[in-house]
Amino acid sequence: MQGLEKLSIKLKENHESIHIARVPKDVKQEFIDLANKDFCGDYGMALKWFVDGLMNAGEEMIMAKLEELDNRVQSLENNPVTEDKKVIKLMDGKEVRTGGKEK
């Protein structure tokens, strides 16, 4: 039997189980200790707690960045940047303006 077939059969037998490979031993032990201490050994709820925390942290970071950008936009709107227009006077008396068009 191939590895994928074995996995498929296992998943059909218990669709709520999960297997995570290649977890460092110290991290695994910390997770088990946390689940035993705070979640009565319920690994699923411990995992949910981690995932919820990660999602909230990401959302909080995005909201903070949006607030920062909003503050920067408000600052720019309240203090518009004006372009300095340089006037050059030619020998024949004509004036040439640089730095943008006049309104």
Image: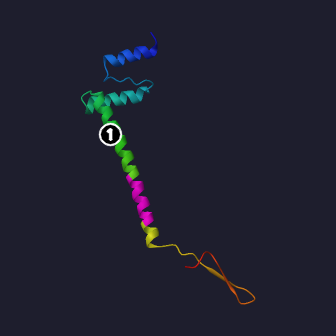
Q: Nearer the viewer, residue 36 or 57?
A: 57
Q: Nearer the viewer, residue 19 or 36?
A: 19
> For residue 102, what is the image quadrant?
bottom right
Q: Pinpoint residue 25: horizontal percent, then vertical percent.
A: 42, 25
Q: The disc labelled 1 sits on which kind of residue? A: Asp
Residue furthest out toward the right: 91
Q: Is residue 24 magenta?
A: no
Q: Is residue 66 magenta?
A: yes
| Rendered position, 18 above or below 80 | above
Magenta span: chief secondary structure: helix
At 39% across and 58% down in the image, what residue appears?
67
Q: Pinpoint residue 4: horizontal percent, then vertical percent.
A: 44, 17
39 to the left or right of 69: left
Residue furthest out toward the bottom: 93
Residue furthest out toward the top: 1
Q: Quadrant of the C terminus?
A: bottom right
| Rendered position, 72 above or below 39 | below
At 45% across and 64% down in the image, what residue appears?
72
Residue furthest out toward the left: 40
Q: Which residue is mark 1?
A: 52
At 37% across and 27% down in the image, what residue appears?
29
Q: Pinpoint residue 26: horizontal percent, then vertical percent.
A: 41, 28
Identify the magenta region.
Answer: 63-73
Secondary structure at badge 1 equals helix
Binning the other alpha carbons within 10 Å of mark 1 as few (below 14), some (14 to 19) or many (20 upward) gives: few
Q: Pinpoint residue 79: horizontal percent, then vertical percent.
A: 46, 73
